[in-house]
Amino acid sequence: MDSTSSSKISWKLAIATIVLRVITIALLSASFTILNDDVLGTKYYHTDDRNKTLQFRDTAGYQYMVATIFLGIGHSVVQIVLAIYLLMRKNKDANKLLLFQFYGDKVISYLLVSGAIGGYIATDDKGEFFGKTNHDQIDSNLNKSYTSATLLLLGFICTAVSSVVSSYTLPKRSSTTTV
């Protein structure tokens, strides 16, 4: 493979990575917006039984979800800037940045999936707390919590795919070992 076809492939991979990161930022932003406006924005709910109060804001699962969303957005923004930098520099001295990109994607993807799972578990716990109610506002917010966690899970998928794409840009190591 000559250098021009190799640079075309790396250019296409960089563009694909940037597009995946922009999609990730959009999904995580939508997840946070739904979670913050519709779920965390309400202080508490009472049902017909006044002894049961639902507070979303104090739930550790939702707080962890928000933290992973912000980490994911921050990581994606940094990686977009690095990808643009690598495109402009035409991959000069890019080995360390490519390794950072690859391993950063691995770490952030695991954080995002754990945040989504935390959101699902917190929502399930809140649903069990109230049992089968006919309270439309609570059911609506529980459904919005599930929607937010699903968007976070889709953000994880984009980051995981980006990690696979970035693995193709890693420098090739020789398989020969010296003794």
Image (cartoon, rainbow, N blue to C red):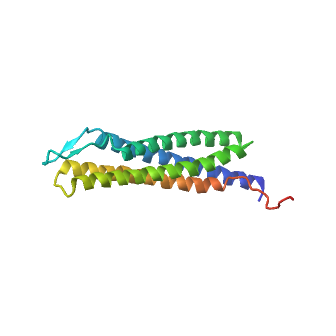
Q: Is residue 81 above or below residue 5?
A: above
Residue 175 percent across, percent down from the top left: 79, 61
Q: Is residue 44 above or below residue 107?
A: above
Residue 20 percent across, percent down from the top left: 53, 50
Residue 79 percent across, percent down from the top left: 58, 42
Residue 73 percent across, percent down from the top left: 49, 42
Towards the viewer: 72 or 14: 72
Residue drawn at point x = 13 percent, y = 48 percent: 49
Using the rendered view, name the quadrant where residue 50 is placed.
Answer: top left
Q: Is residue 135 visible?
A: yes
Quadrant (top left, top right, bottom left, bottom right) of the N terminus: bottom right
Is residue 67 rendered to the left or right of residue 148?
right
Towards the viewer: 136 or 61: 61
Residue drawn at point x = 38 percent, y = 47 percent: 61
Quadrant (top left, top right, bottom left, bottom right) of the C terminus: bottom right
Residue drawn at point x = 48 percent, y = 50 percent: 112
Is residue 102 rendered to the left or right of residue 22?
right
